[in-house]
């Protein structure tokens, strides 16, 4: 292996730049050439490449987003699209690539590997923490910290006006951001897709907390939660059935995907980037780099794609005790 490509693909997440930096610097350390592939698989198909050395990643460890840009690319889903990408990589002399992205990006990488026997390694970059084979994806820690900061601010106004706030957070089909940020911000209720206990129980719990003397409440709702059809319908339902509260909704949206990565995500990105390049050079490819019990580990990409992440039951129990 003489030349390694690196790209970011799918949705961006904080820590992607730190991972790019780690891949580039590890290549420099190992005396292997490194090429930045711009705009994900779209740029790969178009040959949008730029050689990168240790100095081309100065001052990016603290930046959100991705300097390589990202894209969603439908053409790469076709055999013809992937063939184009392969030809571009061959022409540039790239022998392997590291893809930083979510499971869609890994699916594409795996297909590419199967068709062209091209060595690939994945680094999980998504705020949702929904990838099997790692306890943390890059960006999850930063996103939960962002959500906690915002809820702290919302709490100021909630308690000044005796209001009930439904705060919708990201997470796609899973409740990791909601559960962790909800516990961290001291939410009264956390609604996640993994534990749908129905509207009746929610009303009972809100009644109880009002009776026990709480003047305001924050309910964190994961976007994938199905308890109400939407967070706005949830508000209407509670207003209708529990007129004791003045209810407001706050949908946090894309602010959760941006911002400077936390120290945890920077360190994780650095460790994952080193492992990704070392693995390729050791001939261990078609793996995703992950972290488990603070150890950097490898999981076959095929398993990472098919596996399901589990919600932390112990943390659910903690959240229930904390809302007493
Ligand atoms: P996020 O967590 O933000 O969704 P992701 O990596 O899952 O990140 P996707 O948009 O699903 O984001 O995938 C990124 C890109 O990977 C797609 O635009 C496409 O080019 C490629 N891709 C996804 N799924 C496949 C597939 N089944 N076959 C080939 N390529 C794919």
Image (cartoon, rainbow, N blue to C red):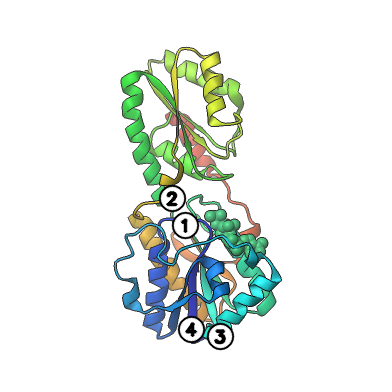
Q: Picture coordinates of residue 176 (x, y %)?
A: 50, 44
Dot label at residue 91: 3
Question: Which residue occupies the foreground of this view, 137 or 156?
Answer: 156
Residue, x 36% and y 60% (percent of image)? 266
Q: Is mark 3 within 8 Å of ligand 1?
A: no
Q: How many marks?
A: 4
Cα separation, mark 4 vs mark 1, equals: 25 Å
Looking at the image, is mark 4 or mark 2 earlier in the sequence? 4
- Whether pointer 2 and pointer 1 mark residues with C-beta atoms closer than 8 Å, the reply is yes
Could you say which quadrant of the image residue 187 lies in? top left
Dot label at residue 3: 4
Q: Residues within 10 Å of mark 2 (few under 14, many from 20)?
A: many
- Whether pointer 4 and pointer 1 mark residues with C-beta atoms closer than 8 Å, the reply is no
Above or below, 250 relative to 274:
above
Which is in the foreground here, disc 3 or disc 2?
A: 3
Residue on which disc 2 sits: 257
Cα separation, mark 3 vs mark 4, equals: 12 Å
Looking at the image, is mark 3 or mark 2 earlier in the sequence? 3
Residue, x 34% and y 40% (percent of image)? 149
Image quarter in which the C terminus is found: top left
Which is in the foreground here, disc 1 or disc 3?
A: 3
Cα separation, mark 2 vs mark 1, equals: 7 Å
């Amino acid at each position: 292996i003489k030349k390694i490509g690196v790209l970011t693909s799918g949705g961006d997440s904080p820590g992607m730049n730190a991972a790019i930096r780690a891949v580039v610097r590890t290549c420099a350390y190992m005396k292997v050439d490194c090429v930045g592939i711009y705009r994900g698989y779209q740029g790969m198909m178009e040959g949008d490449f730029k050689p990168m050395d240790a100095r081309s990643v100065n001052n990016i460890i603290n930046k959100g987003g991705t300097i390589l840009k990202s894209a969603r690319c439908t053409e790469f889903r076709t055999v013809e699209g992937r063939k184009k990408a392969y030809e571009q990589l061959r022409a540039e002399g790239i022998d392997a690539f590291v893809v930083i992205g979510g499971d869609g990006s890994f699916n594409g990488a795996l297909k590419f590997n199967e068709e062209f026997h091209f060595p690939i390694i994945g680094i999980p970059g998504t705020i949702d923490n929904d990838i099997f084979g790692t306890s943390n994806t890059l960006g999850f820690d930063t996103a939960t910290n962002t959500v906690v900061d915002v809820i702290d601010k919302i709490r100021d106004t909630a308690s000044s006006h005796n209001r009930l706030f439904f705060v919708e957070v990201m997470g796609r089909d899973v409740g990791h951001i909601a559960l962790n940020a909800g516990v961290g911000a001291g939410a009264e209720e956390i609604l996640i897709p993994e534990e749908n206990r129905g509207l009746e129980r929610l009303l009972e719990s809100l009644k109880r907390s009002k009776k026990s003397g709480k003047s305001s409440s924050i309910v964190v709702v994961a976007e994938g939660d199905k308890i109400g059809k939407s967070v706005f319908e949830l508000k209407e339902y509670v207003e209708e059935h529990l007129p004791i509260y003045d209810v407001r909704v706050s949908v946090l949206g894309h602010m959760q995907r941006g911002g400077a990565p936390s120290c945890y995500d920077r360190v994780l990105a650095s460790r994952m980037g080193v492992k990704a390049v070392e693995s390729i050079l050791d001939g261990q490819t078609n793996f995703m780099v992950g972290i488990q019990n603070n150890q950097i580990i490898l999981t076959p990409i095929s398993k990472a794609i098919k596996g399901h992440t589990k919600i932390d039951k112990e943390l659910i129990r903690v959240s229930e005790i904390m809302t007493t």
